[in-house]
Image: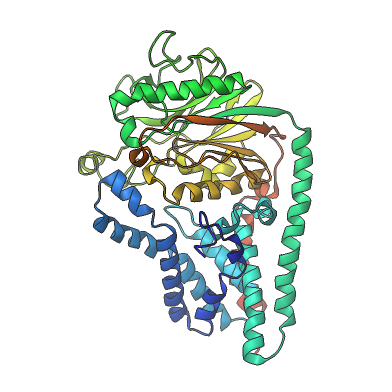
């Protein structure tokens, strides 16, 4: 399962990686299945998300020996998706005559959709770079892709199990697996062709993406701030000259956290060393920190400021979903926590999803990992936005697998709503994901703390402006698919009770 995900990228393993899982829990009582499933899930999450230790070392200053137990706790909790889904399958095995290939996908979707998470985990991530196989995300969200993956795996498993143990061919399971193996890519090809035709006919909007390539440590050094700003302004000017309609910088990429207040209406005037618009005069969406000038609000906001070409602030968006323990701490006095973890911060919460108008175009902004939260992105899509813009800082993670996993999870938002997703990430991966889920203009990840100072870079994303009022089935129905899977799972014992009942 891990090898099928970024950035091992052996995506074809997703067609049969689940077979050992089903074999391990076959015939077990629910409690035993819970244990085996949890062990599989815990191992999978620990391996796949071991980059968490890098975050704790760089962010919280933990020694490696202290960060590993935290990673174990993270894996132990998220591994419950596997454990509880295995227990649900074992429970249904004794309470319904329906075959495993009917209820296994239902159980997985139920747990993947319902279990609260710290960092979203969807096994659809295995196919994030394979647009042909993820077009079903527009029907019910990312969990529909996970459901089709599990369906193929469980159908194949039952065929193999029956052939080996009973020396017969299970036609029902074979037809079930084949229906998905053929139907999913056929549907994908048809939908990609239809959406591509819409993209070809739509007006285009050029977004110039700036990747500043600066580390957290460099951003804290006064001697480096001007170099960082100059690099981003230089690339912005080059992109503007190449035809960009909007310039996009990453999360908190503006290297002067005390410059902007909630009451600010302009960037610094011409000639000021920290003016943004130097050498270019097109609108820009810039990540920074904003504070209350009156002092009534004690903590700052993580903000994206939208400037017109003359440096006037046209709108702003404040981050809503803050990183727990990194940008807020629940149930604990923030001042006490900040003294214990000096690298942490405490941010005020934004008011909610919003669209940022730029002339006739409505921008859908997200900061950091908000772009991998399906329900929140849907709320923004319902604001009639033309495209999604994500400002992110993944510098905390270095050259681990987190930046690729982050991008991979964001891919599904583009397909779910048929909106282009443009991402500016301070140290990569910056990218443009088009409305059919193809990842374009993907940059490399840099680690200035290890490799030394890096020059800023950028690219222009040619984004089609599809009808902002158009809704995909998922955009219209939201969590309906997940709810139906849960209801179907719970109803099976009544609809198809055991033959002996």
Please name the residue shown 51% across and 24% down the image. 235
Q: Nearer the viewer, residue 385 or 403?
A: 403
Give x and y (percent) for residue 278: 48, 14
Residue 78 visible in the current orientation: no
Relative to 412, residue 446 above or below = above
Where, by quadrant of the figure, is residue 170 drawn? Answer: bottom right
Relative to 28, residue 156 above or below = above
Give x and y (percent) for residue 361: 65, 26
Where, by quadrant of the figure, is residue 222 drawn? Answer: top left
The quadrant of the picture occupied by the C terminus is bottom right
Give x and y (percent) for residue 321: 44, 42
Residue 376 visible in the current orientation: yes
Q: Nearer the viewer, residue 135 or 28?
A: 135
Which residue reaches farthest front?
Answer: 451
Viewed as shown, does residue 468 lie left or right of 311?
right
Relative to 271, residue 437 above or below = below
Where, by quadrant of the figure, is residue 393 drawn? Answer: top left
């Amino acid at each position: 399962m891990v090898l099928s995900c970024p950035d091992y990228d052996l995506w074809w393993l997703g067609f049969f990686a689940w077979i050992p899982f089903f074999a391990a829990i076959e015939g077990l009582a629910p409690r035993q299945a819970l244990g085996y499933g949890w062990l599989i899930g815990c191992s999978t999450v620990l391996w796949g998300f071991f980059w968490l230790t890098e975050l704790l070392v760089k962010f919280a200053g933990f020694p490696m020996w202290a960060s590993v137990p935290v990673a174990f706790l993270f894996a132990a909790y998220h591994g419950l998706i596997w454990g509880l889904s295995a227990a649900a399958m074992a429970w249904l095995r004794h309470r319904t005559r329906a075959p495993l290939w009917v209820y296994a996908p239902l159980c997985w979707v139920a747990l993947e959709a319902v279990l609260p998470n710290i960092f979203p985990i969807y096994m659809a991530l295995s196919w994030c770079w394979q647009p042909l196989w993820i077009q079903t995300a527009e029907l019910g969200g990312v969990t529909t892709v996970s459901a089709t993956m599990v369906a193929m795996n469980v159908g194949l498993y039952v065929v193999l199990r029956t052939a080996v143990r009973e020396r017969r061919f299970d036609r029902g399971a074979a037809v079930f697996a084949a229906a998905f193996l053929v139907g999913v890519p056929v549907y994908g090809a048809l939908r990609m062709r239809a959406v591509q035709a819409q993209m070809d006919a739509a007006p285009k909007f050029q977004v110039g993406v700036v990747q500043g390539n600066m580390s957290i440590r460099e951003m804290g050094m006064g001697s480096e701030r001007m170099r960082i700003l100059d690099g981003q302004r230089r690339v912005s000017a080059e992109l503007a000259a190449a035809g960009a309609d909007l310039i996009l910088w990453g999360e908190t990429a503006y290297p002067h956290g005390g410059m902007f207040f909630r009451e600010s209406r302009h960037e610094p005037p011409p000639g000021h060393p920290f003016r943004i618009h130097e050498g270019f005069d097109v609108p820009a969406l810039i990540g920074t920190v904003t504070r209350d000038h009156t002092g009534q609000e004690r903590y700052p906001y993580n903000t994206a400021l939208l400037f017109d070409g003359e440096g006037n602030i046209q709108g702003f968006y404040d981050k809503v979903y803050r990183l727990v323990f990194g940008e807020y701490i629940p149930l604990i006095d923030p001042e006490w926590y900040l003294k214990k973890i000096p690298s942490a911060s405490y941010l005020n919460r934004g008011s909610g999803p919003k669209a940022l108008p730029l002339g006739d175009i409505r921008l859908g902004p997200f900061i950091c990992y908000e772009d991998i939260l399906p329900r929140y992105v849907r709320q923004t899509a319902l604001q009639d936005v033309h495209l999604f813009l994500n400002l992110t800082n993944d510098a905390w993670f270095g050259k681990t697998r987190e930046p690729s996993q982050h991008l991979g999870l964001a891919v599904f938002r583009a397909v779910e709503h048929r909106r282009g997703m443009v991402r500016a990430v301070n140290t990569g991966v910056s990218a443009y994901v088009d409305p059919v889920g193809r990842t374009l203009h993907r940059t490399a990840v840099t680690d200035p703390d290890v490799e030394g100072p890096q020059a800023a870079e950028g690219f222009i994303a040619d984004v089609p402006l599809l009808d902002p009022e158009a809704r995909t089935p998922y955009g219209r129905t939201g969590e309906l698919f997940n709810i139906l899977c849960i209801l179907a799972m719970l109803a099976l014992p009544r609809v198809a009770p055991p033959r002996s009942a």
